[in-house]
Amino acid sequence: MLYLYAIVDRPGEMPLPRVGLADQPIFFYQDGEIGAVVSRVDPQQVTTEASHIWRHESVVEALAEAGGTLPVRFGTFLADEAAVLAMLAERRASFVAGLAQVRGRVELSLRAIWTDLPPPPAVVEERPRSGRDYIERRMVEERAAALRRLRAEQIADDLYAHLDQYAVASVRKVLPTERMVLSAAYLVAREDVPRFQAGVAEIGRDRPDIRLLCTGPWPAYNFVSPA
């Protein structure tokens, strides 16, 4: 079977990594100006162990560094050459549009973590004495949760107001965990990466209530999912 790493722009002009998963050679199938980068791999040779995941990621990162790349999620197989060419033909319009979006751009990841986690409501151990007592406790808990979410959304909006000027697209999750205010990804032109990172550093100096973690650049996984 053929293991799929990515859909790429003008594959004949792009330098490819020599080998990929299971140390198998990397090659491509082309349909016009787009192509699919693959290796011929037995699916039983691919597991979710860290070394296999990182081998996949290293191939995708090398491709993204070389040119327009739509990364494919780890563990994607196609039966044969005919299946690859059929995919390229059937999804040509979406692949061409996706490559136009990511060409010359990278993904930056941002995490915002509370430094002063808002306290949860006090836990009362004894059983409620009545239905009214239970309802009042639930109202206190729900009010505290609503205030925490409101505060998190205000922080997220403030971050977006400062950082969206450097990005062409962005996605976010507010309060994905109790400790994390925001998990976000930004699609940024390569030449704007230093400005984005400087913007994050500036916000971090002005916001003692949160700690910001910015990583990347990465391939644009959060903005394209071709297969």
Image: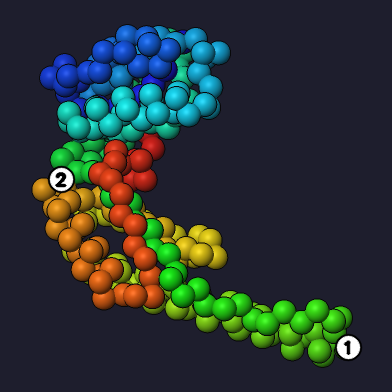
Asked if one can make out residue 82 in the rendered structure from this viewpoint, the answer is no
Q: Which residue is mark 1?
A: 129
* Residue type at the position of mark 2: Arg
- x and y percentages locating residue 204 in the rendered image: 28, 68
Residue 188 image offset from top left, x and y in percent: 21, 50
> Residue at the spot x=30%, y=19% of the render?
37
Q: Earlier in the sequence, mark 2 or mark 1?
A: 1
The one of 59 and 14 positioned closer to us in this rendering = 59
- 12 to 59, vertically: above or below: above
Which of 49 and 98 lies nearest the eye of the viewer? 49
Asked which secondary structure carries label 2, the reply is helix
Name the spot of residue 144 as percent of width and height, x first: 59, 81
Q: Which residue type does callout 1 highlight?
A: Arg
In front: 6, or 26? 26
Quarter occupied by residue 214: bottom left
- Which residue is at a point 45% across and 25% down the rendered structure image? 51
Disc number at residue 190? 2
